């Protein structure tokens, strides 16, 4: 990422990210939220799916709000927005 020189540069960069997320939300019909708490940790949710970054580790999870018993790790290719993951998807990532 390029060096941002001022707080204004950061604001414009974040605005651009927000616009891209809004377009992805429109395309998928899913709510997208993002939470970044430090330079190492981030959490992105899209519908019932989560991408969790903890340091140098990344996790892809299925976490339906109404089915805690169904929570599990997945591969990115298994995600099917609006439904449970496709267990037959390949592990090409």
Image (tube, rainbow, N blue to C red):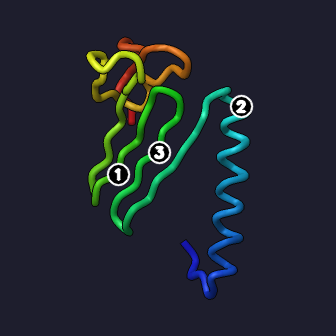
> Could you tell whether 71 is left or right of 86 in the image?
left
Which numbered disc, 2 or 1, marks the residue that appears first in the sequence? 2
Indicate the position of residue 63 as horizontal and vertical percent values: 37, 27
Closest to the observer, 23 or 87? 23
In the rendered structure, which disc, 2 or 3, sits on the residue that comes first in sequence?
2
Residue wearing tag 2: 27
Which numbered marker is on residue 69? none
Q: Residues within 10 Å of mark 3 (few under 14, many from 20)?
A: some
Residue drawn 58% across the image and 77% down it:
2
Residue 44: assigned label? 3
Cα distance in 3D space between marks 2 and 3: 17 Å
Q: CA distance from mark 2 to mark 1?
A: 24 Å
Residue nearest the observer in this picture, 89 or 37 = 37
Q: Verify CB contact (< 8 Å) between mark 3 and mark 1.
A: no
Q: Relative to 23, is 49 above or below?
A: above
Residue for badge 1: 53
Quarter occupied by the C terminus: top left
> Quadrant where the N terminus lies?
bottom right
Q: Quadrant of residue 88?
A: top left
Q: Secondary structure at mark 2?
A: helix
As drawn, the residue found furthest toward the front would be 66
Tell me how far mark 3 sits from mark 1, CA to CA. Answer: 9 Å
Identity of the residue drawn at 61% across and 87% down: 5
Q: Element type at marker 3?
A: strand
Q: Nearer the viewer, residue 76 or 40?
A: 40
**Counting residues from the N terminus, which is met first, the one under dot 3 or under dot 1?**
3
Q: Is residue 83 left or right of residue 28?
A: left
Q: Residues within 10 Å of mark 1 (few under 14, many from 20)?
A: some
Residue at disc 1, secondary structure:
strand
Residue 64, how many percent across, how many down?
41, 22
From the image, state whether disc 2 or disc 3 is nearer to you: 3
- Circle 2/circle 1 CB separation < 8 Å: no
């Amino acid at each position: 990422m390029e060096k941002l020189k001022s707080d204004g540069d950061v604001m414009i960069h974040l605005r651009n990210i927000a616009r891209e997320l809004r377009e992805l939300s429109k395309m998928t019909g899913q709510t997208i939220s993002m939470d970044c708490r430090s330079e190492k940790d981030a959490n992105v949710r899209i519908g019932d799916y989560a991408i969790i970054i903890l340091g140098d580790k990344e996790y892809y999870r299925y976490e339906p709000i109404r089915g805690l018993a169904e929570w599990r790790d997945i591969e990115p290719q298994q995600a099917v927005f609006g439904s449970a993951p496709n267990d037959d998807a390949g592990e090409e990532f």
